Each structure stands twice: as structure tokens, then as C-alpha cells.
Image (cartoon, rainbow, N blue to C red):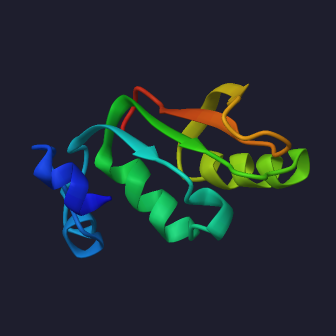
Amino acid sequence: MRQLASRRGEAVLGPQDWHRLPRSSLDGAISAFVLHYGVSTADFGQIARQLRPGAYFAANYFKGDDAAIELLTQEIRGVGLALEYKAELLTTRGASNPLLVFRKSDRQC
């Protein structure tokens, strides 16, 4: 996916590059089909630090049930991002796939 995005002219970062980004350097972040594999609290914290105040983190949670999504939401809230929007994506028949949009508070984390 990174190679395809790069060929299309998109800015692409590998994991090592992403971890080196400075605090408050991102206007937003998107994660597609990643959360259901498990993301560490440290990585969520890194995303929160790199987002500018008021910026958004959007992700889907493929096959996540309500209990798993609630645990994830609490974990992400703990690093300074609040759930602002949740809606079921109608892209996968027979499987839950909600879009979750979190917002960093306007104050610095």
C-alpha cells in the first residue's frame, strides 16, 4: 500500500520514520484495517502526541464487537483522544466494521 501511495505522489512514511515525527506535527491520521490486529497503548500515545490540538484520528475496527470497541475507546481516551463519531461502514456484508473518529483536545497533551 505504501508503494502504491508513493507512486501516486502521496507522502509515505515507514514505521521508523513515523516514530521520529515531532510533537504536534500531524493535522490528522487515518488507520485502515489495523485496529483489529491490536495496537499498543504506546503507539496510540505516539499518535496523540503527534496530532496537533483539535486534530482527528480516524480508523475502522473490523469485526469489533461493542465490548471490544468500548475497551479500545477507553484506551484511546486515556492518551488524550475523545471519540466524536461512530458509524457502521457498509462495506463488508455480515461483519461489523465501524468507523471511529477521535479528536485530540484543543489543549496540548
**Is 79 rendered above or below residue 18?**
above
The single residue placed furthest to the bottom in the displayed view is 16
The image quadrant where one finds the C terminus is top left
Q: Is residue 24 left or right of residue 40?
A: left
Residue 36: percent from left, percent from top:
67, 61
For this rendering, which residue is in front, 75 or 32?
Answer: 32
Q: Is residue 27 left or right of residue 32?
A: left
Residue at 9%, 43% in the rendered image: 9
Q: Is residue 15 left or right of residue 54?
A: left
Residue at 24%, 75% in the rendered image: 16
Residue 61: percent from left, percent from top:
67, 49
Residue 98 location, quadrant: top right
**Is 71 rendered above or below residue 83?**
below
Residue 91 location, quadrant: top right
Inspect this view and state whether residue 109 appears: no
The image quadrant where one finds the N terminus is bottom left
Inspect this view and state whether residue 45 appears: yes
Residue 56 location, quadrant: top left
Residue 104: percent from left, percent from top:
46, 35
Q: Is residue 46 left or right of residue 42?
A: left
Residue at 47%, 30% in the rendered image: 105
Residue 89: percent from left, percent from top:
68, 30
Residue at 25%, 44% in the rendered image: 24
| Number of marks in picture | 0
For this rendering, which residue is in front, 75 or 62?
Answer: 62
